[in-house]
Image (cartoon, coloured by chain):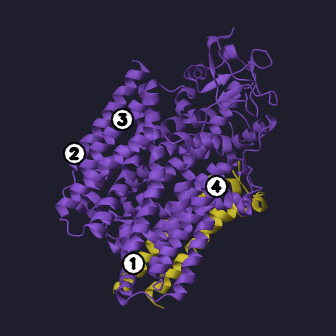
Amino acid sequence: MTFWQKNLILLSCLLFFWFLCSFGFGILFSDYISFIKIGGFEIGFWFSQQGSIYVFIILIFTYSYLVERLERKEKK
Amino acid sequence: MEAQTLTYIFVGLSFALYIGIAIASRAKSTNDFYVAGKGVNPVANGMATAADWMSAASFLSMAGLIAFLGRDGSVYLMGWTGGYVLLALLLAPYLRKYGKYTVPDFIGERYYSNVARVVAVICLIFISFTYIAGQMRGVGIVFSRFLEVEIEMGVIIGMGIVFIYAVLGGMKGITYTQVAQYCVMIFAYLVPAIFLSMMLTGNPIPQLGFGDKLLNSDIYLIDKLDKTIIDLGFSPYTEYSKSLIDIFCITAALMFGTAGLPHVIVRFFTVPNMQAARRSAGYALVFIAILYTTAPAVASFARLNFIDSVQNTSYEDAPDWFKNWENIGLISWMDKNQDGKMQYSSGSPFVESRPVFADERGSLGQRLLENEANTSSSNEVYLDRDIIVLANPEIANLPIWVIALVAAGGLAAALSTAAGLLLVISSSISHDLMKQTFMPQITEKKELLYARLAAGITILLAGLLGIFPPAFVAQVVAFAFGLAASTLFPVLFMGIFSKKTTKEAAIGGMLTGLVFTFSYIVFFKFISPELNNSDYWLLGISPEGIGVIGMILNFLVMLLITKSTKSPPESVINLVETIRRP
């Protein structure tokens, strides 16, 4: 597999989590998972006003770490 | 010392700091002026991006907006942060690798066409001007509220300050002043939030206090808030009141729009390389998240606290801040049932949308109103949403220097965004229109002069928009994001991820997105505002969310046209391969 193909797979995986946590947990499935609670929050509410933002940060740094590793391999 | 004197001192000191920084980091070349010499540290660029991103509206109005929208306010929280994931993963590193100065630069070269470049400049100017008109008005309002001058005077002072550091320093000056502005702004936001959180829940971290139990009680803050507002006839705080498809589309339009906003993208041209661009987007989001995760907490604290201190309290016992803001005219009370107590519930207290104050005061000292009472609601209290953040320091009984600090923070937020926008408009004029399209023979020195000139003229135009605001300023925010999502994002994305997309496709795609989104918003916002409800919307999508459909149309048009046109030349395919290579 070329560097670019690996990059595209990595991107798709991370964007899946991006979609799941914001549009999924925060909006579309919010009502179905509301039985789960974190502190005083229903989990869907937490994701839509707090959690998804934390996940976004993690996603960017994860991507930047993983793709830099790929890039170093590619350069060798 | 008086609060007003302290405010002058704080604001004066912060302005001196910004101008000092601007003088120290003057731009000496076009490279400095457009992209700060491409030598900005990723963390510093992250802070500058955050300051650029968070406008007076984020700083002052967002918490208030969420306090009253409740769960529906989530669209702004997710929409204005999720776009950074798209930027960091899909656009910023590749556009940085490409290595030129502006967004239309990339579109012009990747789509081997000056027509595409000019269409991109048109989209960019459209997007940035709608955005900046609101900012300049914001600058004026903030100045007038804190420094007690007329709004017009406020706009002129703001223009002067921005003029000094944007024209002198270009991107370099703006970047380092924005770093300072971020620090002022975030400190000013967090101090009152932390104290409010301690006051209500005993937890010093607002993000945790938001999900914590109330002080000396077994009830969670969120549950108490939900129960309280349902009792008063509002819809529940934790449930959506708009339809899911609309919530979905608005969130998506804001996310893709964020990723397509030129003044945000161009910030990632200032770092040394593509790795730094990626990391810088991450830092930017961290700095933004500090405010964006605090805002919903502040919103819930403020809403609950407001109801607690007002509901069924007799006017004589109302807290001082209530009376202070009533004097300024942002709170009002109309004793409909003549019991001397304030009743707060859903619905507007009067028929008009804003209070009209009479000159006299009532027997309890309240300001009397000339409004016609709204008999279908028992609500007696009017509250301007914008005061939520402004009133926090008083509500939490903080010392007056905190009020002065919030003033300096609000001004920092407004100025930093205005400056960033000015720069992309002026550089797209001097670089893309003059240097690259109409006057290719000009020297770098001349180009730099034109860039400064364009910045100066843009500030004047923006200032005029601030002083004589078109009636629709408040309604055009949807424009900027919808247009960015439906025009620039798809062509940038395809320009990187597809080698085959042709110039005809890009031009057709941008125009389709522009015309569709523009007409939909203009139709529902200006031509037939009476039809602006879900019965008439396409698929139940409001004008705020329609950018997503524009974006999908843009992608479809590009795919179709690409199939039927001649594939791009070898040099363009090589360009795409180069920007993908690490």
- How packed is label 1: few (under 14 Cα within 10 Å), some, or many (20 or more)? many
**Distance of mark 3 from mark 4, alpha carbons?**
34 Å
Name the residue nearer the viewer: B257 or B442.
B442
Front in this rendered view, residue B424 or B461: B461
Mark 3 vs 4: CB contact within 8 A: no
**Mark 3 or 4, closer to the camera:** 4
Q: Is residue B276 left or right of residue B490?
A: left
Q: Residue at x 48, y 64 (%)?
A: B260
Q: CA distance from mark 1 to mark 2?
A: 36 Å
**C-alpha separation, residue under disc 2 versus residue under disc 4:** 46 Å
Q: Position of residue B444 (x, y in %)?
A: 19, 64
Three-letter amino acid code at the position of disc 2: Ile
Q: Amino acid at mark 1?
A: Arg
Question: Looking at the image, is mark 2 or mark 4 nearer the viewer?
Answer: 4
Q: Amino acid at mark 4?
A: Phe
Q: Label 2 lies in what chain?
A: B
Q: CA distance from mark 4 to mark 1?
A: 34 Å
* Up-down relation of residue B369 to residue B517 (above or below): above
Query: What's the chain of the residue with tag 4?
Result: B
Colour yellow maps to chain = A
N-terminal of the two: label 3 or label 2?
Answer: 2
Q: Is residue B65 visible?
A: yes
| Residue B523 circle label | 4
Write down the residue under mark 2.
Answer: B23
In this figure, which residue is indicated by the disc labeled 1? B110
Q: Which mark's residue is nearer the viewer, 1 or 2? A: 1
Label of residue B156 in the image: 3
Image colour assigned to chain B: purple
| Mark 4 or mark 1, earlier in chain | 1
Q: Is residue A31 left or right of residue B520?
A: right
